[in-house]
Amino acid sequence: MKPPKRLKSLIEEGLIDAVVRQLTSGKEAMVYVVRCGDETRCAKVYKEATQRSFRQAVDYSENRKVKNTRQARAMAKGTRYGKQAQEAAWQSAEVDALYRLAAAGVRVPRPYNFHDGVLLMELVTGADGDAAPRLNDVVFTPEQARDHHATLLTEVMRMLRAGVVHGDLSEFNILLGADGPVIIDLPQALDAAGNNHAARMLVRDVENLRGFFGRCAPDLLDTDYGHEIWDLYQRGALHMEVALTGRFERRTDAVDLGSVMSEIDDARAEEAARRLRLQPAP
Ligand SMILES: Nc1ncnc2c1ncn2[C@@H]1O[C@H](COP(=O)(O)OP(=O)(O)O)[C@@H](O)[C@H]1O
Ligand SMILES: [Mg+2]
């Protein structure tokens, strides 16, 4: 096909030889099948911030690494330079996450290059050798569903051990490659240790897996792996050999009684002060 504008500079640089076809046009990106030498790869072209949907929210970008404090200040102020820096941070977050996760042994597309807002990566292929389907487009037997669910929990644990929470994990962002599930779409990935929303996002990711595979294997529906995994992580006990139970009892001994008591004292003092203010002046 005639190469789209956004891919021209990659052709000029010799990173791409030809554009074969457009794979999808999602909310946040357009994805193309491209030829590089004698390999077929995948090019993800990020849309401009204004054309994107919700995901570049504060939740996700909290504690995202930036190069320097000038950038951080500009981003906080929302100046033009700040917006550009934020845009670049968003786009490069995906390639950073891919390198980090591939190194940690998570099955993600192999990244090749990131150039001019375009991510060049491995084209994940299915059993037929063509672009792999998303889980959402596949029907599973209960055994297959339980199997893939278990595999993906292991991947979530591996990601977490590498310090990453996907943040948008679902049947739409997992492909069924010839060798099993492959996790994609990571520009919103969160820093597990530095982001206050990481726990909530991890639990949501795992609940999405439960909800999807639970349609084919209903026995999965009353499991709670998300809280269990996060609890292990927080206690420094998330090893790959750990046998998950799918059960999670909220541990009452973890409550910090001292800080609860001082909260109550603060509330009492505030209330007393309020009453004093309400009293008519003598
Ligand atoms: N590496 C890849 N190999 C094969 N198909 C891919 C690959 N990356 C993305 N796709 C296809 O493109 C679609 C959109 O990509 P994704 O990264 O999820 O972007 P977004 O959802 O933000 O538009 C995916 O659902 C998938 O069908
Ligand atoms: Mg997606």
Image (tube, rainbow, N blue to C red):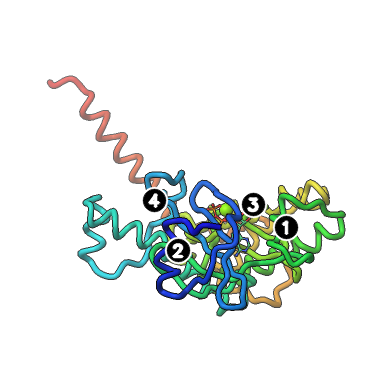
Q: Nearer the viewer, mark 2 or mark 1?
A: 2
- Separation of disc 4 and disc 2 at Cα? 12 Å
Question: Which residue is at the front of the view, 245 or 91?
Answer: 91
Q: Secondary structure at mark 2?
A: strand
The residue singled out by tag 1 in the image is 247
Q: Earlier in the sequence, mark 4 or mark 1?
A: 4
Q: Nearer the viewer, mark 3 or mark 2?
A: 2
* Callout 3: CB less than 8 Å from ligand 2: yes
The residue singled out by tag 4 in the image is 48
The residue singled out by tag 2 in the image is 118
- Identify which residue is drawn at 25% across, 35% down: 273
Left or right of residue 248: residue 85: left
How many numbered callouts?
Answer: 4
Image quarter for residue 65?
bottom left
- Identify which residue is drawn at 51% across, 69% down: 120
- Identify which residue is drawn at 66% across, 65% down: 182
Q: Nearer the viewer, mark 1 or mark 3?
A: 3
Q: Nearer the viewer, mark 4 or mark 1?
A: 4
The residue singled out by tag 3 in the image is 172
The image position of residue 228, as x and y in percent, is: 65, 61
Q: Secondary structure at mark 3?
A: loop
> Looking at the picture, which amino acid does disc 1 mark?
Arg
Q: Earlier in the sequence, mark 2 or mark 1?
A: 2
Q: Earlier in the sequence, mark 4 or mark 2?
A: 4
Q: Nearer the viewer, mark 4 or mark 3?
A: 4
- Separation of disc 3 and disc 2 at Cα? 21 Å
> Looking at the picture, which amino acid does disc 4 mark?
Glu
Q: Cβ–Cβ below 8 Å for labels 2 and 1? A: no
* Callout 4: CB less than 8 Å from ligand 1: no
Left or right of residue 123: residue 189: left
